[in-house]
Image (cartoon, rainbow, N blue to C red):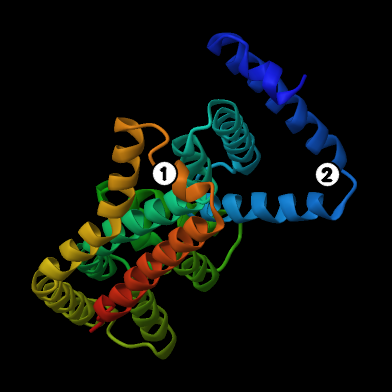
Amino acid sequence: MSTLAMHTLPLPERALLLLLLGAAAALGCYAICRSTRLARAISRYVESLDAPLRRMLLPPRGRFILSVQSTCVLLFLGCAGGLRSSLCLAVALLIVPAPRLLLLYKRKKRREQIEAKLDTFALALANATRATPSVGRALQMLQTSLAPPLDAELAQVLRELRVGSSLEQALLNFSWRVESPSLDALLSSVLIARKVGGDLPSVLETTAATLREIMRLEGVLRSKTAQARTQLWVMACIPPVLVIAFELIKPGYYEPMTSQMLGIVALGVAALAWLVSILMARKILAVEL
């Protein structure tokens, strides 16, 4: 069917036709990709989605996420071509990095939740090691008293100990999953004191006090840079919001620019300048203790 004939169809029939064409294209791409280099690239992408899910102790759902993502991208691309809507094209482009960004955000929030409870965990572990000399037994005593997601991580450590893993390896796996400098310091103090035969409860109490002071200083640092971070968010969000608002208010508002090479170049330069400004602002605000 020619493009002119497709545009003469009613809107519901045109949308259905675009959906069917998108599904056919997806099936064709799947058949081709099974025996090409693209198949390996897709496998690597699926693994990049499964890896953070495993680190968060969630079942791997990379293929399901890829299927939903591909369907949504093809659907919005079809709507962008059939309805001549730059908004649909923008949504399709935003869907491409969305799963990775969402997983990064979830891992960051989970790490922050664990770090917020580390000083309490260190004190509880210090009290438990006074009751029993075995660190594994002390961890088992704490399992029911910890808040999520720290309780799930401790349960995973205990499962690894029950299947024959050493305490050192189980704690290293715990550190690898969370990727937190504060947790690394706490687990390092436990392993070092256990090897050299030091007073583990006293070491844990000192570590808990240190972690508490670090969290206090980080809170002061966040409060001092809160206004600058708010300005960064405004600078990052206002241009896309304005672009979408103008397109919704007056469809085809940007067509004079997108239909000419000079306009496309101007839009590209503006988008590049916007992106560079955000990256530079993030670098300036990346202050660490």
Q: Position of residue 37 (x, y in %)?
A: 84, 55
Q: 12 above or below 45?
A: above
Q: Position of residue 44 (x, y in %)?
A: 70, 56
Please report the residue visible at 56 percent of the width from the left and 28 percent of the height from the top: 79
Q: Which mark is residue 1?
A: none
Q: Position of residue 258 (x, y in %)?
A: 50, 48
SS class of the residue under badge 2?
helix
Amino acid beneath label 1:
Tyr
Image-based side of 221 in relation to 244, left or right: left
User: Based on the displayed image, in which of its 4 quarters is residue 150 positioned?
Assistant: bottom left
Q: Residue furthest right?
A: 35
Q: Position of residue 216 (x, y in %)?
A: 11, 73
- For marks 2 and 1, give the one nearer the viewer: 1
Q: Nearer the viewer, residue 23 or 210?
A: 23
Report how far apart the C-alphas of labels 2 and 1 lie in the structure.
Answer: 36 Å
Q: Which mark is residue 33?
A: 2
Q: 146 above or below 138?
A: above
Q: 266 above or below 87?
A: below
Please report the residue visible at 13 percent of the width from the left and 78 percent of the height from the top: 217
User: Based on the displayed image, in which of its 4 quarters is residue 133 positioned?
Assistant: bottom left
Q: Nearer the viewer, residue 18 or 210?
A: 18
Q: Nearer the viewer, residue 116 or 207?
A: 116
User: Based on the displayed image, in which of its 4 quarters is residue 2 positioned?
Assistant: top right
Quadrant in which the C terminus appears: bottom left
* Count of numbered circles in the view: 2
Q: Is residue 178 visible?
A: no
Residue under label 1: 254
Please report the residue visible at 9 percent of the width from the left and 74 percent of the height from the top: 224
SS class of the residue under badge 1?
loop
Crowdedness near tag 2: few (<14), some (14–19) or many (≥20) residues, C-alpha within 10 Å: some
